[in-house]
Structures are given as C-alpha cells and as structure tokens.
C-alpha cells in the first residue's frame, strides 16, 4: 500500500567567488532616440540571463525592458566575461552592466543639466525621462537628451565597466577566509507516496522557498526553481551512469539513462524569500544552481517519514527502497515486534 | 588537399557528390515566405521600473516560432562534417594508429591524430587533459583520432577504418580503492589523490567530548550527466589571413578563446569564438572539447568543419557530476544543538582534473550545512580513476553534500525525538553568523526560508 | 534514390534523396526547416517531433520515404499568419521555454493533443508531453501554458471569433 511522508531539505549556496579574480565587463550604448544596446560577453544558456541583464541596464538608464537590445557571445565584439558559472551572472555581470549603464547615464546627465538649468548631480533617470530629483515635472524625454548629447555636444552616451568581487586569499592551512562574496539560502519540502510493496516513490508536491536577493524577474526565478527541482528529482530517484567491470559505460543513451519527464513532475509551489544584498545590482544575488541542491535531501527525508527507512545512497531507486523496507521488516520480525 | 587526389579518385568523388548533394546542408529550395508578425510587444516589457517585472524573455518569440538558431542549424558553403573515434578502453598505451584506410574512403577530406595537435593539453586548473589522446588513453571516452568528410555518415563509417592498436594497462575505478598505496596509478608517477582541502575551525575533538550524543553516517551519490537536449556542437573555419572563427556551444567563450589560442599556438587576436544560444549547459559546455580538433581538420581540408556530438558521446566523452562518498560525524547536545562536526569527502575525480579543484573547494566549504557549528573539521580529496571525466555540473558539489548533511540532520532529529523543522531552526545561521571559513554572513535568510516553506506546506498540520 | 512528394506546411515539396534518409534529415538538410532538432537521433528525446497526418511523431524514426504523399506540419507552419498560434502566444507569456531547444517538439505535441482533444485534463496534457524531454524548465510552465491555450482555442471557437487580434492573456 502507499504510504505518505514529507521531508525538509535546507541549503546554502555561494554567489560570486572571491578566491580568484572572476571579472565581467559590459558596454551600454544609448541611441539617439533614448533606446539602448547592451554588449555582454556572457552566453545565454537558457536561464534568461540576457533578459535579466537587459532589465538591469534598463533600470540603470531609467527606461523600459523593451528599450534595451542585448548583444552577446562574440569574443570580437562583446567584452570579456568569466562565464555563466557558479550562479554569478546576475550578481557579477549584472553589477558590470549596472555600472556601465550608469556611466552612459552620466554623459546624459551632463548633456541634460544645462537643458534643465541644474547641476548633473541633481538629476535622475526614470520613466524614460531625465528629470530633476524631487521635481519630476521638470524633465526632458530621454530621446531628446540623447540626441542632444550626440549631435549637439558631440559626446556619444557610451559606458563601459567591469566588476570583480574583491579577491581575498584563503588561509592554506585552515581554509579560513572569505571565499565568496555572498550566499543564498533555500528550503524545499517534499511530499511523497511510497509504495511499500514495490518501493516506488512518487513525488506529489514540492514547496520551495528560495532566496535570490532582489528578484530581477520573478517569472524567470520560478522557471529556475521548477527546472532545478526537475534535475533534483532525477538525481534523487532515477539517474545513474553505470560502468561495467572494464570501466565502460553500460547505459550511454536516453533509453536506459532515465531523466524526468512531464509525468514525473510534482505540483510545485514557489515562494521567493525577501532579502536585499547591498553588494548586488539593485540588491540581487543569484539563483541558477541552488534550485537543484536540496531536492534529493527533501525526498530522502520524506521517504523516511513515509516508511521509516533511510536510504543513504543515490539514486533511491525502487529496488533500494524496497530492499530497505524488507530489511527493516526482517529486523522487526527478528525482534518479535509487530 | 584535393590537388593531391589522383584522377581516379576525383572520378569517384564526382560519382558520389551528386548523391549527397554539392549544396548539402543548404536548403534546396527557398525557405517558406516570411509571414509578417506584427511587432506586438507585451505590455510588461514597456513598463518602468524594469527590475521586478515579470518581463517576457527577449528570445521567447523566436523560440516559440522555431526561429532561434543553434549551432547545428548553421551551415557554411563547402562545410564538412567531423566525427571523433573514441577509445573504448579505460586504460591503455596507444601502440600505433593507422589511418590510411580511412583517408582512402571517398568523401573523406582530412584525418587527424593527437600527435598533430600543437599543444596537446588543456584544463581549467591542471592541464592534464589531451585534445586527442596521443600516447596514453585514460578513460574509454578519450578521443584518439578524427575524420572530416562530406557527410556525417561517411565520417562515421571512416572511423571504423581507423585501426588502433592498444596495450592494455592496469586501471582503477573505485575512488576509495584508488587512494590506497598499492592502487594502480592513473597518471604515474603522481599519486591518485590530486587535490586536497582542509577546513579547520575550533577543536572538533573537544567538541565531541562536550557533546551529549555523537552520530555517524556515510552517504554516497552517483555519477550523473547534464543531458542537455542540445548535444555539443561547433563549426571551425579559417580565413585567408589565418584567422580562426569557431561557432560553438561553449558557455565560456572568453576562456574558450584562450584555450584555442594556447592549444593551436595562435595569438589570441587571431581567434574568434562566437555563440548563439546554448541549448542547455548546466556546466557541461564550459571548457573546450572538440573545437581544436575541428579547427585543425578545417585547416587541413581548407573547408569549414562542423562537429556535433552523438548522444552517446554526450555520456562517454563529455564531463559528469562527481560521485562523492561522504562520512559525517556530528556531536550534539541533547536539545539538538550541534557542537561539533567532522566531514570527510572523497570525490571520484575521473580521468582528468577538469573542474574538480573548484568542486572540491565548494563541496568542502558547504559540507557543514547552513548551520552554526563552533568546532568543525572538513577534509576533501579528489582522486583519479579511469572513468569518465568529472567536472562542473550544476551545484559543484552542493547537491551531494546537501543530501548528506540533511539526511544526517533528520537521523539526528529522529534519534533525539525532535521535529525536523525545530532542529533546523535551532541550528541555522542568523544574520552575522560565522561561516565554516570564519566569514561573517550577511543578508542571511535561512530561517525565513524554513518558516516560509513550512507555512506554505502546512508542515506537520494534521492531515484531513 | 527515393523520389518524394510531400505536403509540408501547406505547400507541396519534392525531393530526391537516398532511401535511408530520415524525415528529420529531409526537413533540416534538404528543406532548410531547422525548427525540428537533432537531440538523440533514436527517438528517445522528442526534440524532432513533427505532425504527420495529424499524429505527433519523432521525425528521426520516420524515413523520408514513409512521409511520401502525406501532410507534414513543422513548427514553421504553425503560425501561417498574424498573430501567433495560441500555443505559441501562451508559451511566450508564461516563460514556458528557457533554452528553447525542445520547444518546437513540445509545441507540436501540444498542438496534436489540442487538435484532437480541445478540453484536456492536466493528466492528459502531461501524457501528451511525456515523449518530449526538457532539461531546463521542469515542464511546469509548459503544462500551464497548454491549459491556457486550450481555453483560448475553445473560447474562440465558442464565440466564432476569428483570431484577427491576439486575445488578452492574463499573466501566469
């Protein structure tokens, strides 16, 4: 029969390593109508980084997401980037993008200041306008300022910047030090049904509460959590590369190496835990890897809650779970307990 | 290359080429007429401020229309197709490689072996990995030779004609066995433990002595693969200035350019690496793999060369996640408060280092869990084995150690009769807590995440 | 050589190809329709899914010759005019695709489902997508988008409204 259980998995994960330099650079170019182009050396791998970086650039310039065109992934044309690794893109590349946007913006402020009769440091960029802080009705449309900068002043609004979390050496003896700039935290709780006659585990529901600092795009954060949970379920229950005695893989194909399908996915509920990291762009940290970290633990603990057996190796296949159930029954039988 | 072919060979080629199509891989008919899509911009992308918006992705529309171009969707005039021969033996000396029969196959334009690689080693930290195996094979997925031909089918068939003679050598597959003194050395004369890290804080033995109970557990995780739905793909081509352009699924193009320049002995400004969008990376496409091979084949053949991994190669030839054996020992007070923790991690480091040093470091630092622990000793080893290369995969050691420390935590909770949520709330980091490496932590929200998840889940509420 | 005459996205296309050519190779290499993807070439991943005579099939498992005389719909044929097909529209607003590589296959599996079953249950949607592997998204936003698209298609049919302008989509 099926027995239900629930289990918690809690984790922490680092963002932006400091043990060695990992810079990212970016360039923001504002066009004569107030739209802009962002150049970044990062490569989109599906997580939505280009969309998020575009939103950060738009925020820095005070324009909308649609106003920023993002160009990426060409070592000739886009500035260097250490890479979309270690969940660092929003934090490190995002900071570079924000700084580059602010540099381009400062050229716009210099051009707008005389137009509005104020000093540049009295200006802010919001809602596609350059306006006087505290007096939003005194403003000039972004396009007018950009055109003025380009064709009247002859100063193109281009900003290039880089960011590197300050490098800090670690103590080689004790491992003490500051290896990462910041960390994110998360908890996933899994609800499973375990069939105590077959050992099969069905994941019914996962509740995920993830910290990512400021969520630049909450919809994409949810996507990362859902995708990470899928990978976590595969890691927990299904996937394994098997080798023969001669060290050759036995199952190098998708028929015999099982990854989750739409049929394997539970109901997923995602909450973003509020937090703000002042060292990240607009308070953002990151989310790409943490999402697949606690899932297997939550499922393992849910299995224990359901049938009282502890499987200590992954994947927790039906065979392993059933063997553990039988072993437990045998132990209880030997002791004479019911 | 083609000038060296005899008249008879050219005649044979003329017979084949009409069958495979001289404009192979370019559309035979014009693509369907472009329908006009109104540039409807979703309102959310027009809103300010931009941060915090559920903005639709800038690539969503092209994805949905099937218009996004991935590397395998690209084609260049005269492009050839490359395949790489995989060793199939886990540990061996290469006695000789005979490629003559493959070179004679009609439609084969270039063949490459390891000894032709200008600098035949790469790796993000230890450069122990060959572009193509030259004298030794260290795992069954090692590439030993490559062929570029007018079609993938001809290239695959030509691989069969390459004769490689191996002298099998001793091998070791289990990382714990590989740590023993008498284990066969994977990369002699060096020992098999190639990376090591220790984190020490406080005094673990004193912590255990002060504990009311001490718990021990061993946990183990398996080798898994990224399984990006898009296989590794790249296209290499040269211009007449000797400048190399590589279109690739590489996630880290700056690093890829550096590695291509190094292995091919080119100035960096003569190398261009271009990406489009990667169809899934997860850490498996972060270092060069076939790119230098394709570049050299392209130089030999005088034509662009494309290589696309088979799904089999995705498993045997690309990197995987480190299996880890994790030993935990934790001392607690009877109320569940953790006083001391000792961790030993043994990472299956595969045939080459790849990202193992970074994975080792991260796993070691994270292994204590998000918990306040005054006395800590965490030690980690990465060990060579003659198996698939273990490298970067989403989490870098975190999924493995989290499975261990959270399973361990629940075992402790059960033994002490404490609710799993309560024991975590008791021990979790607070704002300003000291990490395992003595770092003062800021913007800490572990407890908030625990409480939020528990509330949404209805943790331990009576079931209706 | 196989001489073929196939209706692809509403147009008759002809080709002369070696008999072992798969439908996937025909579409990608001979017709330049690169929306269908090569993920495994043996029918495990579904990235090559196209619709043949109304059925979602793995194009890598179908010989081009087997498609002779049949109607094939690829992702390129899904939105023949303004605006986007409701499935594509829903996928866009729901961020259902991340790297997008599995996308054309998933969308066509969804279309084949909704063409035959306009009011599917969530279980039926999961079942229809079960042959399409996705490593990025966890399928969650895809299933939601298919549900929403089904609703919109039923709504258009009920009111008899021609899809002259895009329906107002609610956010996820």
Image (cartoon, coloured by chain):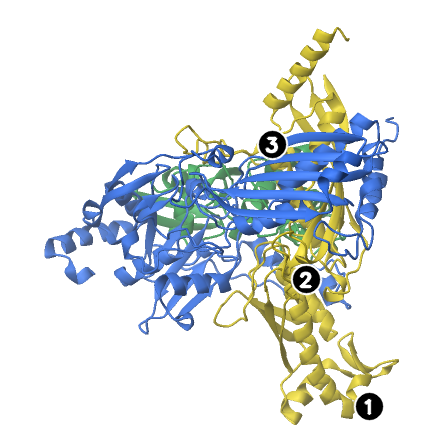
**Left or right placement of residue A184 versus residue B350 in this view:** right
Q: Mark 3 points at which residue?
A: A314
Are the residues under marks 1 and 2 on the same chain? yes
Query: As displayed, is residue A131 above or below residue C82?
Result: below
Give the Cα distance between marks 1 and 2. 34 Å
Chain label for disc 1: A
Q: Quadrant of residue C19?
A: top left
Give the Cα distance between marks 3 and 2. 32 Å
Chain the render paints blue: B
Residue plotted at (52% across, 43% down): B382
Q: Name the residue under label 2.
A: A91
Q: Residues within 10 Å of mark 1 (few under 14, many from 20)?
A: some
Pointers 1 and 2 in contact (C-beta within 8 Å): no
Element under label 3?
A: loop
Q: Mark 1 points at which residue?
A: A118
Element under label 2?
A: helix
Q: How crowded is mark 2: few (under 14 residues within 10 Å), some or many (20 or more)?
A: many
Query: As displayed, is residue C147 above or below residue A66?
Result: above
Can residue A31 be seen here? The reply is: no
Q: Position of residue A296 (x, y in %)?
A: 67, 36
Indicate which disc residue B448 carries. none
From the image, state whether disc 1 or disc 3 is nearer to you. 3
Between disc 1 and disc 2, whose residue precedes? 2
Pointers 1 and 3 in contact (C-beta within 8 Å): no
Residue plotted at (23% across, 44% down): B96
Colour representing chain C: green
Residue plotted at (74% across, 51% down): B435
Colour representing chain A: yellow
Element under label 1?
A: loop
Between disc 3 and disc 2, whose residue precedes? 2
**Left or right placement of residue A242 versus residue A27 in this view:** left
Chain label for disc 3: A
């Amino acid at each position: 029969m099926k027995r239900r259980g629930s289990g918690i998995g809690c984790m922490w994960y680092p963002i932006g390593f400091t043990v060695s330099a990992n810079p990212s650079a970016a360039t923001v170019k504002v066009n004569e109508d107030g739209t802009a182009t962002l150049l970044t050396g990062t490569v989109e791998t599906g997580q939505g980084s280009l969309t998020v970086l575009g939103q950060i650039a738009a925020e820095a310039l005070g324009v909308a997401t649609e106003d920023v065109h993002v160009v990426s992934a060409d070592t000739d044309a886009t500035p260097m980037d250490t890479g979309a690794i270690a969940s660092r893109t929003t934090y490190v590349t995002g900071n570079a993008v924000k700084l580059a946007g602010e540099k381009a913006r400062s050229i716009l402020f210099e051009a707008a200041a005389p137009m509005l009769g104020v000093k540049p440091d009295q200006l802010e960029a919001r809602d596609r306008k350059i306006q006087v802080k505290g007096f939003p009705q005194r403003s000039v449309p972004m396009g007018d300022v950009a055109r003025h900068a380009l064709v009247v002043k002859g100063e193109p609004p281009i900003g290039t910047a880089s960011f590197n979390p300050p490098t800090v050496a670690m103590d080689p003896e004790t491992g003490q030090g500051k290896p990462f700039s910041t960390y994110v935290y998360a908890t996933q709780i899994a609800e499973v049904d375990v069939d105590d006659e077959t050992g099969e585990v069905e994941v019914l529901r996962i509740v995920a509460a993830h910290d990512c600092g400021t969520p630049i795009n909450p919809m994409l954060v949810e996507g990362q959590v859902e995708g990470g949970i899928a990978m976590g379920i595969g890691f927990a229950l299904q996937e394994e590369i098997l080798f023969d005695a001669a060290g050759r893989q036995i199952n190098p194909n998708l028929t015999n190496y099982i990854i989750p399908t739409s049929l394997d996915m539970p109901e997923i509920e995602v909450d973003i835990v509020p937090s703000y990291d002042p060292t990240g762009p607009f308070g953002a940290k990151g989310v790409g890897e943490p999402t697949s970290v606690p899932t297997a633990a939550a499922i393992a603990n849910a299995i224990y809650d359901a049938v009282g057996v502890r499987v200590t190796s992954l994947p927790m296949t039906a065979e392993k779970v059933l063997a553990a159930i039988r072993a437990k029954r045998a132990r209880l039988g030997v002791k004479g307990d019911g | 290359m083609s000038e060296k072919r005899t008249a008879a060979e050219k005649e044979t080629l003329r017979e084949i080429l009409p069958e495979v199509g001289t404009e192979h891989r370019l559309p035979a008919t014009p693509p369907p007429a472009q329908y006009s899509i109104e540039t409807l911009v979703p309102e959310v992308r027009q809103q300010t401020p931009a941060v915090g918006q559920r903005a639709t992705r800038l690539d969503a529309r092209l994805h949905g229309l099937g218009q996004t171009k991935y590397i395998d969707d690209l084609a260049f005039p005269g492009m050839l197709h490359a395949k790489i021969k995989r060793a199939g033996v886990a540990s061996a000396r290469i006695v000789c490689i005979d490629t003559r029969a493959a070179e004679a196959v009609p439609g084969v334009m270039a063949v490459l072996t390891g000894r032709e690689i200008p600098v035949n080693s790469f790796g993000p930290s230890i450069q122990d990995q060959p572009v193509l195996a030259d004298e030794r094979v260290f795992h069954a997925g090692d590439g030993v030779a490559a062929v570029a031909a007018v079609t993938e089918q001809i290239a695959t068939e030509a691989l069969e004609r390459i004769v490689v003679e191996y002298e099998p050598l001793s091998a070791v597959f289990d990382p714990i066995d590989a740590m023993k003194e008498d284990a066969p050395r994977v990369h002699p004369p060096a020992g098999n433990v190639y990376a090591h890290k220790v984190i020490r804080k406080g005094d673990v033995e004193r912590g255990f002595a002060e504990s009311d109970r001490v718990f021990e557990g061993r946990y183990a995780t398996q080798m898994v693969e990224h399984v990006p739905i898009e296989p590794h793909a790249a296209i290499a081509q040269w211009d007449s200035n000797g400048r190399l352009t590589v279109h690739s699924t590489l996630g880290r193009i700056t690093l890829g350019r550096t590695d291509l320049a190094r292995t091919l002995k080119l100035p960096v400004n003569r190398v261009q690496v271009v990406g489009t969008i990667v169809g899934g990376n997860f850490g498996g496409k972060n270092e060069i793999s076939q790119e230098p091979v394709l570049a050299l084949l392209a130089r030999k053949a005088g034509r662009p060369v494309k290589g696309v991994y088979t799904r089999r190669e995705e498993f045997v030839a690309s990197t995987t996640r480190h299996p880890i054996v994790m030993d935990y020992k934790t001392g607690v007070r009877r109320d569940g408060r953790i006083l001391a923790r000792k961790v030993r991690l043994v990472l299956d480091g595969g045939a080459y280092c790849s990202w193992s040093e970074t994975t080792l470091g991260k796993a070691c630092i994270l292994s204590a869990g998000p918990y306040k622990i005054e006395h800590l000793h965490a030690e980690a080893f990465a060990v060579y084995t003659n198996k698939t290369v273990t490298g970067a995969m989403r989490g870098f050691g975190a999924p493995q150690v989290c499975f261990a420390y959270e399973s361990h935590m629940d075992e402790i909770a059960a033994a002490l009769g404490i609710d799993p949520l309560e024991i975590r709330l008791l021990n979790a980091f607070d704002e300003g807590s000291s990490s395992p490496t003595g770092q003062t932590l800021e913007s800490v929200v572990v407890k908030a995440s625990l409480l939020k998840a528990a509330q949404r889940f209805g943790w331990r509420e009576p079931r209706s | 050589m196989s001489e073929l005459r196939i209706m692809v996205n509403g147009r008759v296309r002809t080709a002369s190809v070696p008999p072992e050519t798969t439908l996937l190779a025909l579409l990608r290499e001979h017709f330049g329709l690169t929306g269908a993807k090569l993920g495994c070439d043996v029918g495990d991943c579904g990235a090559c899914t196209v619709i043949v005579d109304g059925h979602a099939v793995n194009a890598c498992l179908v010989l081009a010759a087997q498609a002779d005389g049949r109607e094939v719909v690829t992702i390129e044929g899904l939105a023949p005019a303004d605006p986007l097909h409701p499935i594509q529209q829903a996928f866009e607003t729901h961020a259902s695709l991340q790297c997008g590589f599995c996308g054309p296959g998933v969308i066509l599996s969804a279309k084949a489902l909704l063409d035959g079953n306009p009011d599917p249950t969530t279980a039926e949607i999961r079942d229809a997508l079960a042959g399409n592997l996705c490593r990025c998204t966890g399928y969650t936003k895809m299933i939601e988008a298919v549900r929403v698209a089904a609703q919109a298609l039923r709504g258009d049919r009920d009111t008899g409204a021609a899809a002259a302008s895009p329906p107002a989509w609610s956010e996820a």
